[in-house]
Amino acid sequence: MKKRIASLLAALALCLTLLPMAAFAEDAVGAAQSSRTVITTVDELMQFAADVNAGAYDSKTDAVVSLESDLDLSGKTWTSIGCADNDANVPHFFSGKFYGNGHTISNLDFSSTYGNILYESLGFFGYIENAEISGLTVQGSVNATGSRKYSDFGSIVGASNKSTIRDCVSDISFTNSDNYLDGSIGLCGFAMDSTFEHCQSKGSISVTRTDNGVASLNVGGIVGYAGGTSEIRYCVNTADIEVCANSIGGIAGSLGSGNPSITNCYSIGKLTVLGKPSGGNTGGIVGMINGNTPIKHCYFAGEIDLTNYGVTTPPYKRLGGLVGKVASGTPVFENNYYTATENVASCGTSTFAADTAEAIDSMKTPEFYDKLTQNGGDYRFNPNGTPLLPGPKYTVTFTVSPAELTNVVITANGQTLTNGSIDLEAGVYPVTVTADNCEPFSADITITADTATHAQTLTLTYKPADYTAVDAAIAKAGALNRDDYTDFSAVDAAINAVDRSKNITQQADVDAMAKDIEDAIAALVVKPTATPAPTEAPTAAPTPAPAAPAATAEPQPTATAAPTATPAPVVTATPQPPVTIPQTGDSMNVTLLFALALCSGAALGLAAHKKNRS
């Protein structure tokens, strides 16, 4: 127990250090409920496999693993993800989602590990349960030397329970000669209650014996053995199959109880029939059926080679163009076709007719395509061969940014979306988006198996704001003569504050810019008009009183007795107006005024003196 806990902790710590994109959502007690693992290198892939087999992914049904590059495993010994122990128990397995994203794991060699453990599940994944595997191609080989124990081998997964394998490709060369093999072989070896859709088997499968003995194998291009509610739909096999085995089919080796179904599938790989009269059930689509299995809208258009068949006397009770043998139940056959071959019926069990024989060339015509599709088959016309299946469709979701947009209308591939998503095959598609206040958006998107292309974010651009009022206000300011105003700086500041990056949702801000300019213009103060100062007449200086005439010396009389002097009359001076200093702003010389006043007084005195003398 301590060792197991320590390994779990070590594995978890390694995941955290090697996988920086892992995201964990914790519940109330802090246990990690989800994780995302990104794989870009061989070392990261090997570590992921080791972690699963150490129990780090036990019960993690919400785990997501994303393969984000092609990886070459040349020289690496591969241990299946979810492998069996020596007692054929699988204590740890994967139950999450593995997205191959269209990438390829190449040069994977299973030769040294195939059939070493009894009841082993072997493949890229050994055993999965409640898992989903998609978008993955596995290319490699198995060269089985020596007799091997019972093994469920699948290039994608050895054994699948309650799981889905979608859009996966098996490109495996499986060879064995004169060694006894037991078990099942296919893209998936053994399947119970599982779904396979849009998968393809390529490469080749060859299990031969010189004694023409029958190996105890179920061999199918897609599934070796499928039981329960398993469904196989939209799958194709192009691998050549040459096998001595119990049950061999282009799509499925054997269909067990529970009524598994096959719909819209075809096989065009060459089918070389081997075996003895006592064994070997071989069919273009299914080797053997047990139950009320429905097989609908399928065709086999490969060559049937009977040159090495150990049965020489028809009818061939274990060989059919569609089904080798119906062991039990009442299968339902509808709208199926197979390569017309002499003495080969649609079903080796003569009581069942599994539909119609067609020449290979006729299955390449428009008439055959019409017949196949008008009766319910879902195919594409192929001008260069037999009808093709539609490609896998991926649910593509669209997120429009900014999130607050209103009246958003998304059209993808000419279809208007009602719930923000659409199912599209891989390809390039036109997308348009309209929304209130936004410029129309259009672009081409590329959809592939890569899950990153299944979530599209479309960023719209708002229409620009209307700057008409701002431009008018700026023009108005430009028409003014700034020299006519005391201060033009407020107008300049308002103009310089204009931000031309605003969009239509910010129109109020733009309108405020225009108002700021208008307000600044309205607040301008006109400079006062310069009025010239009035011209003042110079103040006339007072006319000075005339200077008193110089006294003329008169001859003095001979001194005689002076007569008695008559008293001079008192002369009353005429009142003079007070001297007013003009307030003209000019300075008046006070000394001059005083001198003038003295002169005036002297003149008056002299005049009085003359009068007295006279």
Image (cartoon, rainbow, N blue to C red):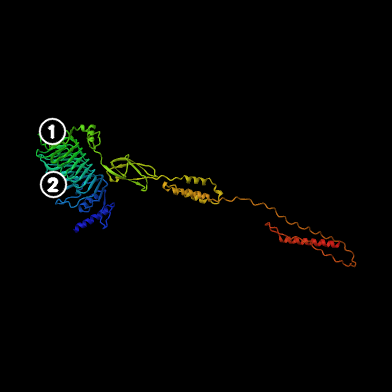
Question: Mark 1 near mark 2, Cβ–Cβ under 8 Å?
Answer: no
The CA span between labels 1 and 2 is: 34 Å
| Crowd class of label 1 (few under 14; some 14 to 19; many from 20; radius 10 Å) | few
Look at the numbered disc 2 and give the secondary structure of its residue.
loop
Q: With respect to residue 273, does 562 lie above or below?
A: below
Look at the numbered disc 1 and give the secondary structure of its residue.
loop
Report how many numbered discs are placed on residues in the image: 2
Horizontal arrangement in the rendering, residue 489 relative to residue 229 (left or right)? right
**Which of these two is toward me, 554 or 92?**
92
For mark 1, what is the residue?
343
| Crowd class of label 2 (few under 14; some 14 to 19; many from 20; radius 10 Å) | many
Residue 315, image x and y in percent?
11, 34
The disc at residue 174 is none
Q: At 15% from the left edge and 33% from the top edge, which residue is drawn?
A: 341
Q: What amino acid is labelled 1 in the image?
A: Asn
Q: What amino acid is labelled 2 in the image?
A: Tyr
Residue 159, image x and y in percent?
18, 47
Tell which circle, 1 or 2, labels the residue nearer the N-terminal end.
2
- Of the residues tagged 1 and 2, which is closer to the observer? 1
Q: At 48% from the left edge and 45% from the top edge, which residue is drawn?
A: 469
Q: At 71% from the left edge and 55% from the top edge, which residue is drawn?
A: 539
Residue 103, image x and y in percent?
25, 44
Residue 77 visible somewhere in the drawing = no
Residue 319 visible somewhere in the drawing = yes
Q: Quadrant of residue 26?
A: bottom left
Horizontal arrangement in the rendering, residue 383 relative to residue 483 (left or right)? left
Q: Which quadrant would the C terminus be assigned to in this image? A: bottom right
**Which of these two is toward me, 460 or 269?**
460
Residue 318, image x and y in percent?
12, 38
Horizontal arrangement in the rendering, residue 204 relative to residue 545 (left or right)? left
For mark 2, what is the residue?
150
Q: Which quadrant would the N terminus be assigned to in this image? A: bottom left
